Image: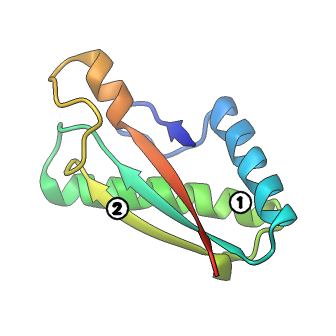
Amino acid sequence: KKIYFEYDRSDLSTQARTTLKEIADTMQANPSWNLDIAGHCDERGTIEYNLALGERRARSAKKYLASLGISADRISTISYGEERPVDARSTEEAWAKNRRCEFSFITR
């Protein structure tokens, strides 16, 4: 699953909160699973700024999952900044796809 962000933002949309609720439900049903959250950005901005923004996005998702009862110890975050685009074009459509968090479940 993925959630998306507005340009230069790390706050969660209503759609992102809905997706995160689904992820929280899955984690509650599978208490041995952990979660990796990867924050991503579009290409605009410096490398350093985008790494920090990706981290803010991942932490925002983690904080919301914790508010839904998921232990923060089960969640790790990483930022890839602009380094792993889904769409390499320099268009509004591509940038919107690249401003995201991706989630990976990890089983122990």
Task: Point out residue 38 in the picture as x, y percentages from the top left corner.
Answer: 43, 58
Query: Is residue 38 depicted above or below 93 in this figure?
Result: below
The mark nearer the N terminus, 1 or 2, is 1
Label 2 environment density (alpha carbons within 10 Å; few <14, some 14–19, many ≥20): many
Q: In this view, does 76 lie above or below 27?
A: below
Query: Answer yes or no: do the residues labelled 1 and 2 have beta carbons within 8 Å?
Result: no
Secondary element under disc 1, as helix, strand or loop, is helix
Q: Say which element carries label 2.
A: strand
Total number of numbered discs in the rendering: 2
- Front-most of 35 and 10? 35
Res. 97 mark: none
Q: Along the horizontal axis of the image, is 54 left or right of 104? A: left
- Give the residue type at disc 1: Leu
Quarter containing the C terminus: bottom right
| Residue labelled with disc 1 | 65
The residue singled out by tag 2 in the image is 79
Image quadrant in which the N terminus is located: top right
For label 1, the crowd category at 10 Å Cα-Cα, with few meaning under 14, some 14 to 19 and many 20 or more, is many
Q: Looking at this view, name the residue that lies furthest to the front.
A: 108
Q: Is residue 23 or residue 9 the one in the foreground? A: 23
- Horizontally, is 23 left or right of 2 in the view? right
103 shown above or below 34? above
Q: Which residue is drawn at 15% across and 23% down?
A: 90
Q: Is residue 54 above or below residue 105?
A: above
81 sits to left or right of 12: left
Q: What residue type is labelled 2?
A: Ser
